[in-house]
Amino acid sequence: MTRPRKTNEAMLAVRAVRTEQANKAVYAFFVAGADLLKFAEISRVHRDGEGSLQGFQRKGIKGHVQAITEFLDQGPVLFPNAIILALSPRARFTQSRGEKPSGDVRSCEAGTLRIPLPNDGPKAAWIVDGQQRSIALSQAQNKSFPVPVVAFVSEELSVHREQFILVNKAKPLDPRLINELLPEVDTAFPRDLSSRKIPSELVNLLQTSSDSPFQGLIKRLSEDSTNAVVTDSALIKAIRNSINSALGSLAPYKATAECPADVDAMYRALVAYWTAVRGVFPEAWGRPPTESRLMHSAGIEAMSLLMDRIMSRAAPGTDLLLHATESLTRIAPYCRWTNGRWAELQRDWNEIQNVGRDIKLLSGHLARLDHMHAFAKVA
């Protein structure tokens, strides 16, 4: 048992448990989020005057920090993500006295950890993982919000860098998996995730509802279907753009300060438009992207931009399915989804790829066709 040494240096005392890994002490404890940066510093990666690499942390991402802070400030939230620290040996641990509880597996010991709080000079810890969260916690309104910390004792920069790489080298969650999970979780999310939730809910409805033209056709990580031909991320992106664009056909239904988002209205508009697409282009619908560029991510995005033009000019009370069908029928003779050549684009049907330039060319061409024939009578 290590006893605290006598010192005039201010100390932060926390209840902690101690174990050992690779001959290094490892502690787990909770501290108020606002106290983290009082004893732990962020070692930014940089090169000194001689060109030697110092530190290891990347630059802070202001938008990410702000999003976390907003999440923390919205009320009672669950935020159990642990901060990982490298701790100076100047911290001292005092084991608690008393008998071990019955059944104790003896993997750790409880006690009090005292961490120096220097007025100047080097701090007693370095943040290995969680710098954005630490900054956000220091800026949050609730200064007493308890945050879990795991700290290993080491002053060696090489060890700090090693752990930083190991913590961050793991592949992050696939965005498609996050999108699929979002509709199943009923809780408040940080801003970046909240903006993805409604599009994910709509894609889930389009995949599962019997009145949806996309039923069973959407590729999702949770399903292994040979009939699925449309990537979920392409639809989610298209829907999100329509909601967020000032000219998007789904934008009128998004949430405002006065009322929540009208997801039902968004769904009805999507079903009407894409049912019309299926009806006007039956030979191209439901086929793999290698056989139909309508089902290709480029086709989905370009046709979604066309949806914003067509559906936005529908008058209140209009039969949306009939309106979309009439508009699409007028341009159908000029579309080349499964064979032939897009004359104005000078591209064969299967040369359209899911890259920004091709999507811009195709969507621009469809918009011009729609503009030219918008007021022509259906043959």
Image (spheres, grey):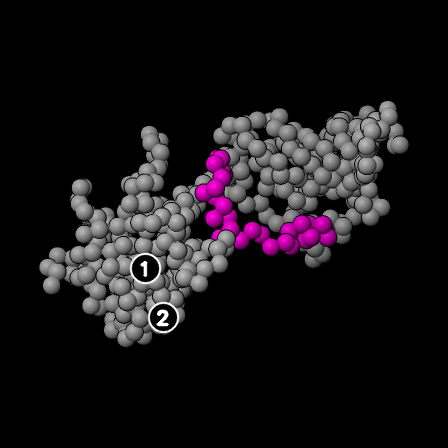
Q: Which residue is mark 1?
A: 302
Q: Are marks 1 and 2 in contact (CB under 8 Å)?
A: no
The answer to which of 208 and 374 lies nearer the viewer is: 208
Rendered-image quadrant of the C terminus:
bottom left
| Kind of residue sitting beneath label 1 | Ala
The image shows residue 204, relative to residue 259, as above or below, that is below
How far across and down, in percent of the image, does residue 16 sit? 76, 31
Whether residue 111 is visible: yes
Q: Can you give x and y, in whole percent of width and height, for residue 203 in the image?
A: 39, 49
Instruction: Give the percent coordinates (x, y) of residue 223.
Output: 48, 55
Q: Residue at x 39, y 55 (%)?
A: 216
Q: Is residue 61 left or right of residue 197?
A: right
Residue annotated with mark 2:
291
Asked which quadrant contains residue 261, the reply is top left
Mark 1 surroundings: few (<14), some (14-19) or many (≥20) residues within 10 A: many
Q: Is residue 198 above or below residue 356?
A: above
Residue at (21, 59) in percent of width and height: 328
